[in-house]
Amino acid sequence: MPTKAGKVGIGIVGSKFAGELHATAYSRCADAEIVAACSNRPDELEEFTTRFGINKSYSDYHEMMKDPEIDIVSICVPNFLHHAVAMAACEAGKHVVCEKPLATTMEHAREMVEAFDKKGLKLMYAEDWNFAPALVRAKEIVDEGAIGRILYIRAKESHNGSHSPFAQTLDYCGGGALLHLGCHPASFVRYITGQEVVEVVASITEGFEKNLVHHGLEGEDFGVALLTLADGTRAVIEGNYVTQGGMDDCVEIYGTEGVVKVDLTFGSPLSVYSSRGYSYVLEKADLSTGWTKPAIDEFYSLGYETELAAFVRCVKEDLPVPEGARGIDGLATLAIVKAAYQSAAEGRPVDPRELW
């Protein structure tokens, strides 16, 4: 049930980076109220709830699920916990927004989708690319027919690596750069074409000393995959942890009658030269001296604000979850990446639909 103010009640599990993204986006949504937050780290939780004006806090997410004012649970914890938290929310009758990836294994992702479908609850996959204004506009242009039939897509997300201890071990994270970063282009390729991926051929670094840079990382620090879609469209997706200078997200869409290019993170209209440096340029940028192109509002430009507002509206008005952001879309995206891992390991093409 909505809160006494008529807003959709939000409970956030996790108080680190992803939790901050969600809390900031929800705080900008007129129809949302962050009712509670949960973390097993008391000092972090206190700072988090104070900063965002959250009145209730929990150290156990099972207890938080009993809160009758919570309509949506935002899952912002390490990947290996997504399944457990989602299933607890489902059992408690709560809708869920789950950060990417949906789960670390296909079995867990499948179980999540089936459980929420069975209970008639909304499982919303937090793929922010589908809500980023530049990519929304790109899709509008493509859908209008401006570049003809799509022939080929090239898309990547890259930066210099995750500092989270949970990103270093496969049991915790489920994969390396291709899962953590490449999941965005994998999901967007399905979304903009409306087609399923039928074949994946991939190459990745193999972890530890076989990585290009990150020799303490169990997963890959570089991954690239060639996708073939059902209608014959080709796409190359990439995720890497070897890019210096800040997070670099790019999409290029080639059609029979034109091209669309999107520079999602370095496309700022603002240029700054500073010999002294300043507080923040963009995500993962480690220098602010010289010429830089600082982000204006990443919560908006990367899609977080419009994404979570859309999810809140889905619950408040009982609307279908947008295509590309459903639990089944998270399952399909995970299958593409897992197929890439299988392809790289076995040296052959893999059909991700076989993993569903």
Image (cartoon, rainbow, N blue to C red):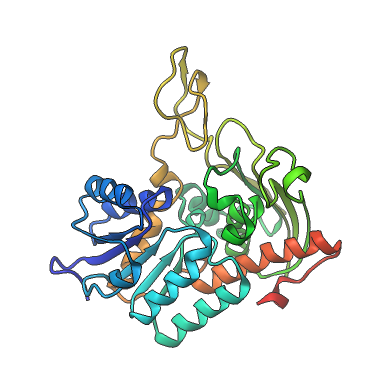
Q: Residue at x 54, y 35 (%)?
A: 266
Residue 293 position (above or below residue 40): above
Along the viewing direction, whichever of 28 and 331 lies nearer the viewer: 331
Q: Residue at x 52, y 60 (%)?
A: 79
Q: Residue 36: percent from the left, percent from the top? A: 25, 61
Q: Tell which residue pokes out farthest to the right in this image.
A: 347
Q: Residue at x 52, y 19 (%)?
A: 291
Along the viewing direction, whichever of 101 and 320 lies nearer the viewer: 101
Taking the image as shown, residue 112 lies to the left or right of residue 343, namely: left
Taking the image as shown, residue 138 lies to the left or right of residue 117, namely: right
Q: Residue 74: percent from the left, percent from the top? A: 37, 63
* Residue 165 in view here: yes
Residue 278 position (above or below residue 159): above
Numbered-mark total: 0
Q: Which quadrant of the figure contains the C terminus?
A: bottom right
Q: Which quadrant of the figure contains the N terminus?
A: bottom left
* Residue 254 in view here: no
Taking the image as shown, residue 17 lies to the left or right of residue 173, namely: left
Q: Residue at x 54, y 56 (%)?
A: 139
Q: Quadrant of residue 261?
A: top right
Q: Residue 247: percent from the left, percent from the top? A: 55, 39
Q: Tell which residue pokes out farthest to the left in this image.
A: 4
Residue 206 position (above or below residue 112): above
Residue 51 position (above or below residue 94): above
Q: Residue 186: percent from the left, percent from the top? A: 63, 59
